[in-house]
Image (cartoon, coloured by chain):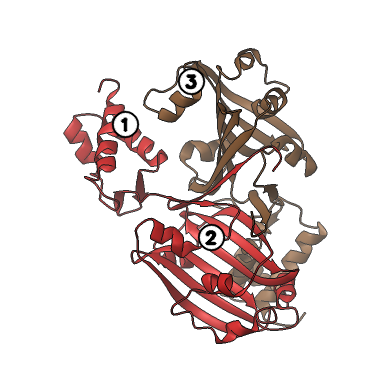
Chain colours: A brown, B red
Amino acid sequence: MTGPLHQRIRADIEARIRSGEWPPGHRVPFETELMADYGCARMTVSKAMAALVDAGLIVRRKRAGTFVARPRVHAPVLNIPDIQSEIVARGETYAFRLLSRTLRQPDRDSPEEVALAAGGKLLALDGVHDADGRPFALERRLVSLKAVPEIAEADFAQTPPGAWLLEHVAWTEAESRISAVNADPDDARLLALDEGAACLVVDRRTWREGQHVTRVRQIFPGEAYDLVARFGPGA
Amino acid sequence: MTGPLHQRIRADIEARIRSGEWPPGHRVPFETELMADYGCARMTVSKAMAALVDAGLIVRRKRAGTFVARPRVHAPVLNIPDIQSEIVARGETYAFRLLSRTLRQPDRDSPEEVALAAGGKLLALDGVHDADGRPFALERRLVSLKAVPEIAEADFAQTPPGAWLLEHVAWTEAESRISAVNADPDDARLLALDEGAACLVVDRRTWREGQHVTRVRQIFPGEAYDLVARFGPGA
């Protein structure tokens, strides 16, 4: 290949990643090593690495170094995603870890919680979706006991709360709000991310025939997840 | 109001914001000042402030302090947004600053650019959408001259490139990819954000009857913009 050296370095690394020689999670050599290998300045190496980060092929972790990225999950926007299926479709093992389960009254300072509870109690469920034993998404959920009384007895060891709800409740309407946030210290720890890492957040509310059923906040590492929508002018 | 002190502090500040006493951009007192005002520990104040950040009412800026947030723009997912209208709808003035305009060959290392160009040249347009004189979104766009030859002569002083395209091209299909990234130093400077601030990124490709017209990356400060989708099970 001809062209500038930073393009050659980029192409060499990309070829190793595409061929599988460097699998996801493989540590990419330090910039100083690449400078020695190619006999070039740091700026040349940095330019190649920046292009690989932009292309989503490698990720940088503070203090730990630079690693081959796992392929991002591209999920459709207009859907309640089955995270388990998304992970299994990548050939990875799936597990849900329930962090906490609390039956409680709505926070009377939160009009949204009061409306969701509709005079009843709320089941608060926090948990982590794991892919191949590593955190994939963090989930904080509230379910209206008034709308779904039988969830009080549900056992989430086999079926995580989202899948349980999809099986038990014929929802008719959902609204998702998609935003970007910097991981706070708690969320960063739970997702094994650097504090401040950009996360894609989906806040979704779901109704059944006008009755509010559940509200969930799902937090995905930005490097691992994006949302896709295909549409026409009449959408 | 009764209840824990951190809730009272939160409610006091929220009331000042909702009443307009503290408008968007107003500096919130430092935690040490609030500790003195309420005669309480830092943890109590921090709890109140964290709740206000979560609610999107205030934003923290490194080194500069904490400020009343501007209301977020909630844009529909399934749409090519007219950013100008979104800003004007908030009662703010709109302006587009063209940063660069380059007519060039596609990067032959990028299969996507080669496909977009379809044997012709690309017009590369970078610019910033301003609201009330402050950066609202950063836009990096490529337009296929083969698909839209007349854009070579367009003057974007009155009409920014996105609006120009909506006026001149009857698009038939679009695909958006939504992701979260940490602002790199360049983008942070252009958006007047802290480096690393979480940004919501929309990468959108647009076609007219199967012909690829344009590709645009729009970068929004996470604190200022989110996307909303309402849908049913048949979506």
> How far apart are the alpha carbons under marks 1 and 2?
41 Å
Mark 1 or mark 2: whose residue is earlier in sequence: 1
Asked if labels 2 and 1 touch by Cβ distance under 8 angstroms, the answer is no
State the residue position of label 1: B43
Q: Quadrant of the C terminus of chain B?
A: top right
Nearer to us: label 1 or label 2: 2
Q: Secondary structure at mark 2?
A: loop
Say yes or no: labels 3 and 2 on the same chain.
no
Counting the numbered discs, the total is: 3
Q: Residues within 10 Å of mark 2 (few under 14, many from 20)?
A: some
Q: Nearer the viewer, residue B189 or B13?
A: B13
State the residue position of label 2: B81
Q: Does residue A3 appear to the left or right of B1 in the view shown?
A: right
> How far apart are the alpha carbons under marks 3 and 2?
35 Å
Q: Position of residue A28 (x, y in %)?
A: 68, 58
State the residue position of label 3: A118
Q: Nearer the viewer, residue A89 or B215?
A: B215
Q: Amino acid at mark 1?
A: Met
Residue at x 76% of width, y 56% of height: A22
